[in-house]
Image (cartoon, rainbow, N blue to C red):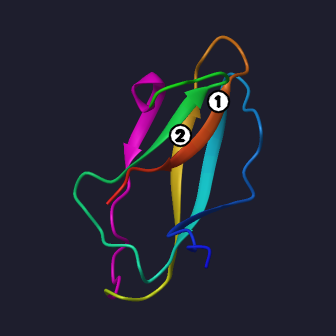
Amino acid sequence: MEKQSKVVFRNVGQLYFPQTRVECHYSLTSDHHWSSSDWIGLFEVGWSSVKDYYTYTWALAPEGYTKGTDVNCCALFHCTSSHPCLVPLAISPD
């Protein structure tokens, strides 16, 4: 049986261009366990390691979140790279 993802990114573009605001919308299933070390990273095309991130933001539990429920979230980034390059990756593993 295939295991369902705990994190699902929604409406994610393939590339983002310099001087643009990037909204990264994602959903977390009730199976996700929040950790203070959860983060979402943007990576240059061709990345090969999670250490290759361009920038990141902490993935904090939304205000009013109830443990054990599905939740929709949004992380905001401002792309300042000099070339089109960025692709959202994921929240770090539990």
| 9 to the left or right of 28 | right
Residue that lies at the very extreme toward the left in this rendered image:
36
Image quadrant in which you'd find residue 63: bottom left
Which residue does the numbered mark 1 point to in the structure image?
86
Q: Is residue 17 above or below residue 6?
A: above
Say which mark, if any, is on residue 77. Answer: 2
> Which of the two residues, 60 or 5, is positioned nearer the viewer here?
5
Q: Nearer the viewer, mark 2 or mark 1?
A: 1
- Where disc 1 sits, the SS reads strand
Quarter containing the N terminus: bottom right
Pointer 2 with pointer 1, Cβ within 8 A:
yes
| 10 to the left or right of 89 | right
Specify which label sits upstream in the sequence, 2 or 1: 2
Amino acid type at circle 1 is: Leu
Quarter containing the C terminus: bottom left
Is 53 inside the magenta-drawn segment? yes
Image quadrant in which you'd find residue 5: bottom right
Amino acid type at circle 2 is: Phe
Q: Position of residue 77 (x, y in %)?
A: 53, 40
| 5 to the left or right of 59 | right
> Which of the two residues, 94 or 72, is positioned nearer the viewer here?
94
How many angstroms separate mark 2 from mark 1 (CA)? 10 Å
Identify the residue at image location x=39%, y=73%: 32
Q: Position of residue 37 (x, y in %)?
A: 25, 51
- Where disc 2 sits, the SS reads strand
Identify the residue at image location x=54%, y=35%: 42
Q: Which residues are magenta?
A: 50-66
Q: Position of residue 7 (x, y in %)?
A: 53, 65
